[in-house]
Image: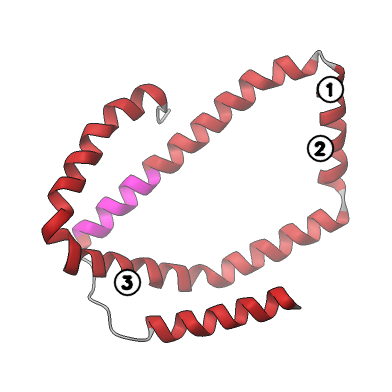
Amino acid sequence: MKLTFALILALQVSVCVWAQQWPEPDKELVEKYEGLKAVFFKRIVTAWEKVKDSAQPMLEGTPTGGRAQEIYGEIKQSPRVESTIKIISGLASELEPVVDKARLALLGAYGHYLRPYIGEHLDKAITSIKPVLDTVLPQA
């Protein structure tokens, strides 16, 4: 009940903040953001798969690893966990339009107010970090 009340209160506050008119972001900025976001998520998924693939053989031969797999199976089949996952996914799908609108408003505010001053420096920083990320955390 407290969580629901806090969520409703936070949504009301966010609606008041986002009710004002924010500048629209440039299409180029939105496309650049979406591209960087997609690459970031690919890097995270690839890293997770590598960690999982490297840890799984080590855990299979140990008693702790076997017990961890049993616990994971029990948790996965638990009705409470299933209902929690359904509730969280339902909330996420309900909040998706609000999050998209907030993201576009923030991109618009960045493009209008900050990009003229820090945009070039941020772009250079991202470009210089990419080779390091390609070696440490590759996309594929």
Is residue 6 magenta-colored? no
State the predominant SS element of the stretch in magenta. helix
The circle on residue 72 is 2
Q: Which residue is mark 1?
A: 64
Q: Range of the magenta residues?
A: 28-38
Amino acid on which disc 3 is placed: Ala
The quadrant holding residue 116 is: bottom left
**63 in relation to 109, above or below:** above
139 left or right, relative to 80: left
The residue positioned 17% from the left and 40% from the top of the image is 124
Residue 43 image position (x, y, % from top left): 44, 35
Q: Earlier in the sequence, mark 1 or mark 2?
A: 1
Q: How many other residues sit within 10 Å of disc 2, few (<14), some (14-19) or many (≥20)?
A: few
Frontmost residue, 97 versus 8? 8
**43 in relation to 136, above or below:** below
112 left or right, relative to 100: left
Q: CA distance from mark 2 to mark 3?
A: 40 Å
Give the quadrant of the N terminus. Answer: bottom right
The residue positioned 70% from the left and 21% from the top of the image is 56
Q: How many other residues sit within 10 Å of disc 3, few (<14), some (14-19) or many (≥20)?
A: some
The residue positioned 58% from the left and 72% from the top of the image is 94
The circle on residue 105 is 3
